[in-house]
Amino acid sequence: MQPTNPDGFEAHILIVDDHEDIASLFSWILRQAGFQTTVASSGPEALEFAQSQEFDLALIDILMPEMDGPSTLVRLREILPQVRALFITGHSGLYELETLLELGAHGLLLKPILPARLVEAVKECLLLSPA
């Protein structure tokens, strides 16, 4: 059975991380769990994808060059207002969780992330109401 979003179709996850090895690993883990994934290596690239594709959830690294994760989410929501979002980071303390939630994120995952925890967090987020 394919994991689905609450609307009943296969969930499409946008993974935004400037570390391509990490993004590829997250993509592989989520594809193994039955999700469709698209990987963007930067905020601007994520915005380009959002112009032509629908996403149910964005998994966004907080610390990236060019455009950080919070800025990426704000701009992404201008294109896809209903997209759910989880932030990921290897640097705790950069942003207060409250600040990230006020931007519309549904949570924060700290790297390193166990594969089972990543899949569980994505499934939990997909059960929440969109932004």
Image: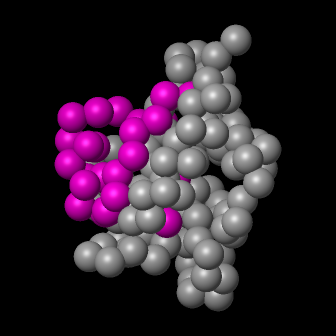
Q: Which of 51 and 28 is in front in this view?
A: 28
Magenta part of the chain: 35-61
**What's the colour scheme?**
one colour
Q: From this viewpoint, is residue 85 visible? A: no
Q: Which residue corresponds to the image point at 20% horizontal and 48% vertical from the top-left? A: 48
Above-or-below relation of 93 to 80: below
Within the magenta stretch, is there residue 38? yes
Within the magenta stretch, is there residue 85? no
Residue 92 spot, x, y in % from top left:
66, 82
Q: In this view, does 52 lie to the left or right of 109?
A: left
Count of numbered marks: 0
Q: Nearer the viewer, residue 89 or 103?
A: 89
Q: In this view, does 130 lie to the left or right of 74?
A: right
Above-or-below relation of 106 to 35: below
Q: In which quarter of the image is the N terminus?
A: top right
- Residue occupying the far top of the picture: 1
Q: Which residue corresponds to the image point at 25% horizontal and 55% vertical from the top-left? A: 45
**Residue 64, located in which quarter of the rendered image?**
bottom left
- Residue occupying the far bottom of the picture: 93
Residue 15 spot, x, y in % from top left:
46, 49
Above-or-below relation of 127 to 71: above
- Residue occupying the far front of the picture: 21
Residue 81 spot, x, y in % from top left:
37, 47
**Residue 68, located in which quarter of the rendered image?**
bottom left
Q: Is residue 113 left or right of residue 53?
A: right
Q: Which residue corresponds to the image point at 61% horizontal and 24% vertical from the top-left? A: 34
Residue 32 spot, x, y in % from top left:
64, 29
Q: From this viewpoint, is residue 92 visible? A: yes
Q: Which residue corresponds to the image point at 59% horizontal and 71% vertical from the top-left? A: 89
Q: Nearer the viewer, residue 71 or 116?
A: 116
